Image: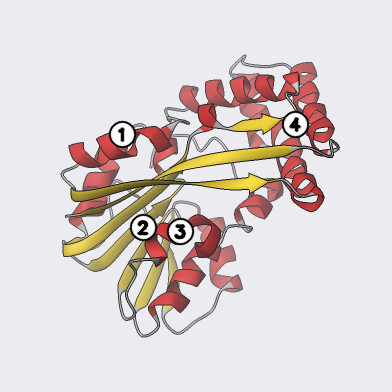
Amino acid sequence: MTERYTHGHDDAVLRSHGWRTAENSARYLLDVLEPGASVLDVGCGVGTITADLARAVGGGHVLGLDRSAEVVARAASTHRAANLRFDVGDVYDLDHPDGAFDVVHAHQVLQHLGDPVRALTELRRVCRPGGIVAVRDADFSAMSWWPAVPGLQEWREVYLQVARANGGEPDAGRHLLGWAERAGLEQLRWSASTWCFTSEEDRGWWSRTWADRITATDLADQAIELGVADRELLERCGDAWTSWASHPEGCFVVPHGEVIGRP
């Protein structure tokens, strides 16, 4: 990957990514994943989904790849299993032969890439004939929330502009089917699922992660560098997250597109 990663790897980001599990973020894959399968998890981050996939395949084996050596080291030190390992890798140039894996998976990866079709073509290459390529990505423009705190609309506009300036497509979820078709994947199955944050505890956690990310992480620095926002606007966005979380009727929905295809 050569694009700039919009989220960065600050602690607030990694805390958020560490919440993800195969159950809440890869249910569509678990439904078809077979014991004994070999799995490549591209863009594995801190490895929580990867570790779950290793448990799901039992006697199979799972390799988690990420471009960040620091994050790979953190994942490897946190998740230990005989059938699980982590390594640094490039989604555009995977260091594996054709057909090396039964399943190739990427969660929240394609949205950050300037050439998602090229990446999907590479995922297809390392998946065996008859295997599974599975990808899932969020759709930022389709996110919805209540109450309609104005600052959250400003937050979204800042994020969309930064992500696109970095070469990505933050509405990737709606594009997955078309990208998969152009990458030559067949027998495509598109689905959608959501993350929903409604309880007081969930609102508090979700709002803190984003309030921190929009004010005090690499995302905030990028927004200022790109001229998308100034410090006053970013602080207003952070305050909006806190305001939203305090509302007893508050809810936030994050929709995702999901595609399973065959080489």
In the image, residue 185 lies at what x, y percent? 18, 48
Q: Nearer the viewer, residue 125 or 140?
A: 140
| Residue at image mark 3 | 26
Horizontal relation, residue 79 to residue 37: left or right: right
Image quadrant assignment for residue 228: top right
Q: Nearer the viewer, residue 124 or 223?
A: 124
Position of residue 39 relative to residue 111, above or below, is below
Q: Residue at x 67, y 25 (%)?
A: 155
Alpha carbons under labels 2 and 3: distance apart = 9 Å
Q: Which residue is denoted by mark 2 in the rendering?
A: 105
The local secondary structure at tag 3 comes to loop
Residue 126 is left or right of residue 247, and the answer is: left
The answer to whether mark 2 and mark 3 are in CB contact below 8 A is yes
Q: Which mark is residue 115?
A: 1
Depth-wise, is mark 2 or mark 1 nearer the camera? 2
Label 4's element? helix
Upstream in the sequence, badge 4 or badge 1? 1
The quarter in which the C terminus is drawn is: bottom left
First in residue order: circle 2 vs circle 1: 2
First along the sequence among labels 2 and 3: 3
